[in-house]
Image: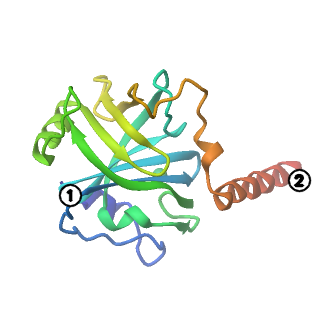
Amino acid sequence: MSLTKYVAKRRFDDTPEPKGKKIAAGEKLVFTIQRHHASHLHYDFRLELDGVLKSWAVPKGPSLNPSDKRLAMMVEDHPKDYATFEGDIPQGNYGAGHVDVWDHGTYEPIDEDGNVITAKEFAHNLHAGSIKFRMKGKKLKGDFALVNMKKDEKTWLLIKHRDKYATDEAYNSEDYAKKSSLAYTEERNARKKSVKKK
Ligand code: MN
């Protein structure tokens, strides 16, 4: 897995994002979910595998309600040190806007029956278009699946499994966003409105 696309899309003299070097795998695999208000608000869902972060953009954000099937568009691999990145990507750059970490923790790759599997088996499942994993975050806990929609390589669905962490209540990830994230969006929307009025 390579960071070629990640590097090609960015100008590192103008964006505070990490340049990205492959970092040796730690004991546990990490995940991060970043709330990213770029041209459109979305959540970036990233799972460490083979020294990089496999990444999906989830427009509606993740959900703990198993009846929600959240569209997840696969995007380029990101470097592992992107997991803690927060800040403003300046106008004119790829993904210009504000990034905050929404949730961060470790995960375990699991099989169909919920048994922990190796990263190698997980990579195989990813290639086959269907992965399951157990999240140990502050907000996201328990078992999830990401399933490729077969119509193309990029279109996946993110689904919560029914377990003790699941909820039947409506789940809106924005309800759990940081105040700073929401303030950025509010300020940006207000600016847009005032521009329209002129
Ligand atoms: Mn993004």
Q: Position of residue 151 (x, y in %)?
A: 31, 23
Q: Residue at x 36, y 44 (%)?
A: 135
Circle 1: is it few (<14), some (14-19), or many (20+) Cα within 10 Å?
some
Label drawn at residue 198: 2
The front one of 174 and 1 is 174
Q: Residue at x 61, y 51 (%)?
A: 177
Q: Position of residue 56 (x, y in %)?
A: 38, 43
Q: Residue furthest right?
A: 198
Location of the N terminus by quadrant is: bottom left
User: What residue did someone put label 1 on?
Assistant: 2
Q: As displayed, is residue 71 above or below residue 122?
A: above
Q: Position of residue 43 (x, y in %)?
A: 50, 46
* Coloration of the structure image: rainbow
Q: Position of residue 106 (x, y in %)?
A: 33, 54
Q: Are marks 1 and 2 in contact (CB under 8 Å)?
A: no
Quote the CA–CA distance across marks 1 and 2: 46 Å
Q: Residue furthest front?
A: 164
Q: Is residue 177 visible?
A: yes
Q: Is residue 119 left or right of residue 133?
A: left
The front one of 191 and 174 is 174
Label 1 sits on what residue type?
Ser
In the rendered structure, which disc, 1 or 2, sits on the residue that comes first in sequence? 1
Residue behind label 1 places its C-beta within 8 angstroms of ligand 1: no
Residue 175 falls in image quadrant: top right
Label drawn at residue 108: none
Circle 1: element type: loop
Circle 2: is it few (<14), some (14-19), or many (20+) Cα within 10 Å?
few
Q: Is residue 92 left or right of residue 49?
A: right
Label 2 sits on what residue type?
Lys
Q: Residue at x 18, y 68 (%)?
A: 24
Q: Is residue 140 left or right of residue 89?
A: left
The front one of 91 and 153 is 153
